Amino acid sequence: MSTCSVSKGCFVFKPSTKKRRLSDKTGHDFRCPSNDSEDTQLRFVTCQSLWNQIKSETEQIQEDLNKQLLDNLVSFLSRSHSDFQEKTTEWTCRMKFREIPTAALVLGVNVTDHDLTFRGLSDVLQDNITPYVALLEAKDCPGIKNLMQKLMGQLMNCDIDVDSMDDEDCVQVSQNRIRCSMPSLISWYDSVTKKTDSETPSKKRNSSSRHWRSPPVVVIFKDMESFTTKVLQDFIVISSQHIHELPLVLIFGIATSPMIIHRLLPHSVSSLLCIELFQSLSCKEHLSTIIDKLLLTSRFPFKLGEKVLQVLINIFLYHDFSVQNFIKGFQLCIVEHFYSQPLSVLCCHLVDIKKRVYSLSHDQCENIRRLPSFRRYVEKQESGKQIELLTNDSFLKEETQKLLEDLHVYHENYVSILRCLHVFTSSLPKYPLGKQIRELHCACLENRVWETEEYESSLQLARMLNKTDLVTMLQQCVEILIASSGKEFDRAIEKLKEFLTQFQNLEAEASQERDVSVSPQKELQKKTDLYHLQKTLLELKESRRSKKLTKFEMLRFEVVDYIDSLVRRYLVPADNRTLHEIVYFNAAAVLRGHLNAAPRTALHTALNNPHWYLKNQALKCDGGGISNKAPDICIVYKLHLECGRLINLADWLEAFSTVVMAAEEPNADAASSDQVDDVIHARFIRAVSELELLGFIKPSKQKTDHVARLTWGGC
Amino acid sequence: MQVITETFYFPDHCISYLCTSKGTCIFRTNYRTSKMPNLEHPAYPAADLLHLESLVPCRESQVSMLLSIFGERQQFSFPCIFIYGHTASGKTYVMQTLLTTLQLPHVFVNCVECFTSRLLLEEILIQLQSCSSGTEQTSPVRCDTLNDFVRLFKQAVDSQEVQHQTLYIVLDRAEQLREMEANILPAFLRLQELTDRNVTVVLLSEIVWELFRPNMGCFEPFTMYFPDYSIGHLQKILSQNHPPEYSADFYAAYINILLGVFYMVCRDLKELRHLAALNFAKYCEPVVRGEANERDTRKLWKNIEPHLKKAMQTVYLREISSSQWERLQHDGGEAGQLKGLSAHTHVELPYYSKFLLIAAYLASYNPVRTDKRFFLKHHGKIKKTNFMKKHEKTSNHLLGPKPFPLDRLLAILYSIVDNRVAPTANIFSQITSLVTLQLLSVVGQNDQLDGPRYKCTVSLDFIRAIARTVNFDIIKYLYDFL
């Protein structure tokens, strides 16, 4: 931006227009300049609508998960000031000290997710309990004064929301004039509650009737840990003085453990509070639900590949525990997939596939032919069909449609069978295939699960399950298969039900059999002769080894074998399916680069190997040598890697000038080489100060003419 | 607070005038009973004094002292009185009762509430206005400096009807004054002189005057100490407010038991009163059920004693809240069902955060020289005795955590995590997250480029619990436990 002003100074530029024209934006971002035939517009629209669906779904899930917690909180709040409402004059109430009702809300360390919870909480509170909710953050409240200002500002603004908007201006003015102290807050509260009392008919009445006569004022401390002790103490002491006039409720958002309350507040202050503990759902359970509802379903056409899913889960488990970040990562996958894969236009719901396939351009058909999975498919076909597929576009389209439909059916079956398998594996001792369904899912996506050792050992363990477990598992499987949308499972359901009836029959038979068979143990007890005893024992052992399996054991083997056959049939890894590239996003490296950036490594690469980023052939260096064509900072950086903790500037300059001069004029006269060229000197100084700016070195006071290294090793 | 408005007429024979050696008259009443009141002052009606005496049990001597300092209504009193004493020793209550019962003109301000000097000064002026006119404040006063205050104060006092009576300004929690501008406290100490009006400032605080005295020197106030209530006092005061359904003796017996349990840990009158109210229902239970007589003290004691002990461990420490406690009592449940706040010490952390915290703990509690011994593969055989210096013989855990630079933290992290850790942005942001969670703390607020230094603030038990979840035997790596 430029101004017509001659003088130097600070100028304020207001953003031109707030409203961006959306129509302009669509497609632009996705469009490649070269070819327009790749349905960019359609891809963009598909991507948008898919994301919107997923977003609303996740919001719904989160709402459901938080429901329990919010309900508990709401009941606590409605209970908290009930005596304030009734104005009881009972002896105990008079004698008891009036404590401030406080909810300690333990939310877990994933601080990024808290915002959403708090937003949901304040919405619920405003709907059900009170319009007066204030959210305070530690960074806004370095002192008690700022805290009161923030608190009053938020409370008085929320009053405006309830009232009509026209008198906003006068309130704004008065707010500056109002003294930020508790008495003025109380007088405000009195006036507000009186007003709603005396308010006559109209819809305002309806809106306020949900709240009580004197609704509590809820103050939420979002990040309890970051508040300074003094601010909290002062605020609690002040508000406890006025609890009779102002029904205050505090909510502490705690990320670590409730012990922090005792650490922050001395007994004299914590005795002013009436603290109750509320715990939110653990973030791991939260993630499981999200994965269950978003990934293990055939509702959304878009799928994550094994590597990508692993990256997202690893970031969650290793780094941040944040479900929000997981969803953001998922969103990034969607955008990246639709952006980079031209054929992603076919990544849509089944009903749209036919239309989209037939409107594909020739370029897109060529794109399909280029897909590795499709090429593999072509190679398997007979030669006549091969030629057709590679030359005839309309034949290709027909085939593509068929293949995509197959893929869709595969997904439906996959999910159901995966759940069935999980029913079995999740109850085995030591969980060879993982406890969570996401681990099983990853294992199945990675390669043929039945070829792994873990699968083998879990089958072994499954063959030792007892009958009651087995029956309940089979029942669960039947339920899953009935609930699934797959059409191929009628036979499987039949078969499983048959197993169940066989088990029931076994029970009846077993009771009869028990009477008939004479147990060898009993015979054993009769014999006392040592020789005979030995003989019978040997016989017993023999018979046990060769003994025919009992009916139950036979049946158990059959069941396990049947499950195994289902797994082999339906849990084929997605990589083996033709056209999987269209719906599966597999670019894990891209995702890792975006979500788990390594700035230090990137910086090192840039300085150590400038060719990597600049793509200049001249910079291509071989081995560890230092090219003098490289930018000065790279040379300086490489030289500094060879030094210890303290670097002598003179030596460094010497080395630098040697490198720079090396190629230029190897036979320069001795007199000039002794003296460093001024230009080179200046270049060196600039490079060193750049390095200082990047945080690699700093001036040192330990030795003159030395700088200290701030990094160690070569990364 | 109820103020007596009726007037009493005393028969002549009840009032006797006694002349003292100094020639002042002491007013003595025999009111209805033959009980002799301790408080006496010629300027105030005897009935008020008697009523006042009944309101401030166990503080008669302090009150009479104050009364004699105050003198008569019109008389100039000491310019500044400083009253100190432990928490809940009745400073605020006595002052308030005294001033309202005798209807002395006064302003009562809590300094915690008025966190800036402007708020404090304005609050005083507002109260002054309303106490003089009796109506709502006419216009919001604006008073930024002490100079303005003196001017406005003079105006306000002059407009009052009671302008010749001593005005009392009571500043509760006066220790807060020390944190305001430097001129506030000295000015309040000699407000009488500055305003040239009949005013006395009373400062109430929990700390001694020596901690107030500014180094510039100031006018010395008259200091007065309120001693702690003794167990007898507590018994007397607490028994005074017995519930209407039960007799005073019954309640006094209950208070006796309560004090027997709690007196060792808590002498705070407010807290004791609260606890008494919380647990009284349980005490009455046998009586309500008809199992015991009101005078069956032993039986009642057996019933309540374990209950009170449990209360001491839970509700007194605010481990569980008083409303939860009451609900428990009501439902007849056991306190064990409800876990206290300290029971939830477990903190779930991401995998690398756990290792970062462990590394930070090791860096905080191990001397730098020993890193070689713990984290190098071929460190040779170094025994503890060999490289132990004299000052390191004391346990590092007793000395507390030491600060360490970021580089050391990362170096330890890389060597304790099994697989290779890339120095990604996520790792660095996790360190900052740990700081915001107060599990680590930054030492010195210098530039981030300059190599920040941290301290690990978690306890040994906490870190052991964390280490157990990642199968890391932290004790093996701690120098103190070698």
Image (tube, rainbow, N blue to C red):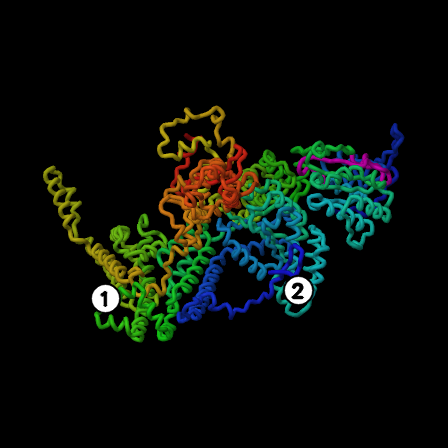
Quadrant location of the N terminus of chain A in the rendered image: bottom right
Circle 2 Cα neighbour tier, 10 Å, few/some/many (<14 / 14–19 / ≥20): few
Q: Label 1 sits on what residue type?
A: Lys
Mark positioned earlier in the residue sequence (1 or 2): 2
Q: Nearer the viewer, residue B9 or B123?
A: B123
In this orientation, does residue A648 appear? yes
Depicted B376 relative to depicted A351: above or below: above
Numbered disc in front, either 1 or 2:
1
Is label 1 in a helix, a strand or a loop? helix
Depicted A352 relative to depicted B18: above or below: below
Q: Chain of mark 1?
A: A
Please give the count of numbered marks on the rendered protein.
2
Image coords of residue B279 (percent x, y): 58, 43
Q: Residue at x 69, y 50 (%)?
A: A182
Q: Which residue is mark 2?
A: A163
Q: Residue at x 82, y 52 (%)?
A: B133
Circle 1 Cα neighbour tier, 10 Å, few/some/many (<14 / 14–19 / ≥20): few
Q: Nearer the viewer, residue B395 or A95?
A: B395
Q: Label 2 sits on what residue type?
A: Asp
Query: Label 1, label 2: how many angstroms apart (C-alpha)?
Result: 73 Å
Image coords of residue B135 (percent x, y): 80, 54
**Residue A178 lies in the magenta stretch:** no
Is A422 placed left or right of B403 in the picture? left
Q: Residue at x 63, y 56 (%)?
A: A154
Q: Nearer the viewer, residue A312 or A531?
A: A312
Image coords of residue B219 (percent x, y): 78, 33
Is A539 placed left or right of A267 in the picture? left
Residue range corresponding to the magenta coloring: B65-92
Q: Which residue is mark 1?
A: A380
Q: Chain of mark 2?
A: A
